[in-house]
Amino acid sequence: MLSTLPDQATLEEVHSSGAYVKRDVQIVRGTGARLRDIAGNIYIDCVGGMGSANFGHGHPAILAAIQHQAADLIVCPELFHNPVRARYQAALCRAAQMPRVFLCNSGAEAVEGALKIARLATGRPGIIATMRGFHGRTMGALSATWNRAYREPFGPLVPHITHVPFNNIEQMQAAMDDSVAAVLVEVVQGEGGIHPANDGYLQAVQTLCQNTGVLLIIDEIQTGFGRTGWLFAHHYDGVQPDLLCLAKSIAGGMPMGAVVMGERVGELPPKTHGSTFGGNPLACAAGLAVLDLLQNTHLIQQTHQRGEAVLAHLRAHLPEQTVREVRGRGLMIGIELRGKVAPILQTLQERGILALSAGRTVLRLLPPLVITDDDLWHVIDTVEEVLTHAV
Ligand SMILES: *Cc1c(COP(=O)(O)O)cnc(C)c1O
């Protein structure tokens, strides 16, 4: 396959770590929900930067914010005050209805931060995570991640982290004791196969946490910033996390992560955590543009409506012979197949659609929320056609 690729792709295969299995396409440009490859082919993007491109590619407001801020100041460690960071922290805290935030640079870092903060705030070591959960690849986040293939080569991992079945409150309760600092959950398990929390589950988890002095950490790294038709997915569930992990689309594609901290956590003692790039004005400016976009347009409401329409359509039209179940919230869509998803992804790519998997059998669609109706329904029709032909 290598010999059919142009030179740069070969170069990348030779020099990159080897950790990624790449598709044989070289993406060079993006506009809205469309991507262009080096040969000039256009694709509809339902990978959405694996969740980091909720606002598409080259969004004018985000682009302008980045360009202006880059000209003023890119780095500024939290050794100093910075007005852009100040405005961003206030805006994010207001959006999350939580008093404080620690800014970092990725999802895994946000989870690491939350785990440290939970131990610091409670003086307890234990973390309860969930089966099928995904929280990142660094040691702490990895220890909370369920997938054995990701974890096993890297032991010994961080101790005192246990996993209980997702959506099962009895087993969560059984795992709670006075060594537990926090429960760590996603609202819709993303990498684990697009499994939304059942109605009432997160409220029951929250009650359990409140009754036992345990902190509730919600990982909204993939579900945040409008993806599910809510600013944050947990708003649908009517719960309030003590620690909220954010990243991916937080800054419109610029690398950034955040741990938003609730009343029960309070303020961190000085020098207990830190990050060189954390809170840099460039990412903060992009983050401000994202919040402005979500709060002053109908994008969230539109995502909610389009998500309901698309999920209903898929449930009604996908063939039972190839499809086990359709799950999702908003434009976070999972189609569980009876067979493997890899050949379906390949066929879709040949038909001009880039999509994701979530495990071996789930087709995952994370289109930018700004995707046009025409492109969105073209994707849905094509998926339907491809899955019907796959019978
Ligand atoms: C992607 C993801 C992470 C890890 O984020 P990185 O930025 O890749 O480290 C953690 N949790 C969830 C739910 C994710 O989807």
Image (spheres, helix red, strand yellow):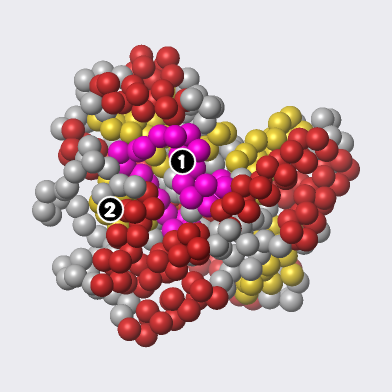
Q: Front-most of 229 and 223?
A: 229
Which disc number belongs to residue 235?
A: 1
Q: Earlier in the sequence, mark 1 or mark 2?
A: 2
**Residue 62 on image: x %, y %:** 49, 72
User: Is label 2 in a helix, a strand or a loop?
Assistant: strand
Region of the chain picked out in magenta, as a range: 226-251
* Residue 236 drawn in magenta: yes
Residue 303's disc is: none
Determine whether, in the image, residue 126 is placed left or right of residue 371. Answer: left
Q: Position of residue 271 (x, y in %)?
A: 12, 54
- Figure check: 175 above or below 352: above
* Residue with the mark numbered 2: 101
- Of badges 1 and 2, the one in the foreground is 1
Give neighbour class at mark 1: few <14, some 14-19, many 20+ (Cα, 10 Å).
Answer: few
Label 2 packing within 10 angstroms: few (<14), some (14-19), many (20+):
many
Q: Is residue 265 left or right of residue 339?
A: left
336 part of magenta stretch: no
Snapshot quadrant of residue 369:
bottom right
Eyeballing the image, is 334 above or below 165?
below
Q: Amino acid at mark 1?
A: His
